[in-house]
Amino acid sequence: MSLQDKMRERARELLESGAVNMVIGWEKGTFWYLSPPAFITTPEEADRLVWDEFCLNNLSKYLLDYRNTDDKIALFVKGCDSRNVVRLLQDNQFPRERLYLLGIKCPGLKDSRAASLLGEEKRAELPLAPKCVGCTHPEPVIYDELLEAGVSGDLGSPEKRFEDVEKIEAMSYDERYAFWVNAYARCIRCYACRNVCPACDCRECIFDRTQTGWCGKQMGLTQNMFFAITRALHVAGRCTECGECERVCPQRLPIMTLNRKIIKELNALFGPYEAGVSLEAKPPVVEYRPDDPDFEERR
């Protein structure tokens, strides 16, 4: 039985038994290279579910839409999805007892943007999706049930995780400044990166509160860079490197390069840490301890 058949079968069984009210997975979109999220609420709809090389969307983000309901939700999770589920649980954004996690071992997915340009006849030659390059956890880190099968594919090398960061670090100060100015001069502040990010789980975002004057509505380099740096620092220590922000950016900005630079610095300051891998491990910049030696020095 293929993984897709298993997914449909389990979704049907869970809905028929009343164990869950909804199953969140993927379905085929308008184009052959799109497999967007699917929200299944009846057993008959289970046949909409698919698994292919374009199931790129991180489904954990959609749990936030149901955090104020009583619905019990079954969620298909790849490695990146599962790490963000851990983050949401750590932030008390969704109760574990209302989740049923169906784990999928991800073999690495394909670049849908490249697919749109190359055409379906080049399907076998498609490159790995940028978000999968450097993936360190292709298998789910948390699940209730693990579905074994998967589609064929090649994962990126974890050694490439900080490759882009190191290129920027090798530049002069002027070259670095020019790089970021060129990038964020193109930002249109559509907030797609914020909206898709599972780590952006605040109930009210600072950038929606225009009356505070933190950031104006006009497009401009200063405003754009303020938004980019503020958002990156807000998810510092909590970014799981799922790459959704960069995947959905219409301007193709190097958002993950900035995120990974912060991750690299945090690792240097506080020791190796990967967000969302363990429920017990606390993010380095969100935990307060009175016995912290730096705390004593500041007093």
Image: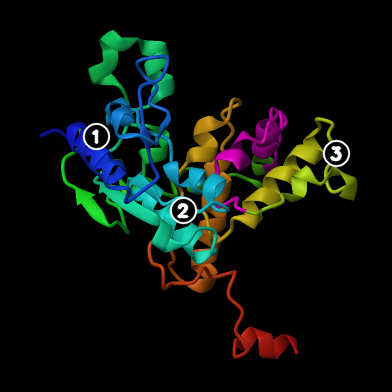
Q: Quadrant of residue 216?
A: top right
Report the residue marked by disc 1: 8
Write the residue at 46% across / 49% down: 241
Question: Which residue is at the front of the view, 184 or 113?
Answer: 113
Write the residue at 37% across / 32% down: 129
Instruction: Provide the secondary structure element on which disc 1 rests.
Output: helix
Disc 2 marks a residue whose amino acid type is Thr
**Chain part drawn in magenta:** 177-201
Task: Tell me, for residue 216, which label it has, or none.
Answer: 3
Q: Are marks 3 and 1 in contact (CB under 8 Å)?
A: no
Specify few, some or many for label 2: CA neighbours under 10 Å numbering under 14, 14-19, or 20 or more: many
Q: Quadrant of the N terminus?
A: top left
Instruction: Provide the secondary structure element on which disc 2 rests.
Output: loop
Question: Which residue is at the front of the view, 96 or 118?
Answer: 96
Q: Position of residue 11 (x, y in %)?
A: 28, 40
Specify few, some or many for label 3: CA neighbours under 10 Å numbering under 14, 14-19, or 20 or more: some
Disc 1 marks a residue whose amino acid type is Arg
Q: Earlier in the sequence, mark 2 or mark 1?
A: 1
Q: Are marks 2 and 1 in contact (CB under 8 Å)?
A: no
**Is 4 left or right of 299, judged from the image as shown?**
left
Report the residue marked by disc 2: 240
Against 46, residue 58 (above or below) is below
Against 111, residue 279 (above or below) is below
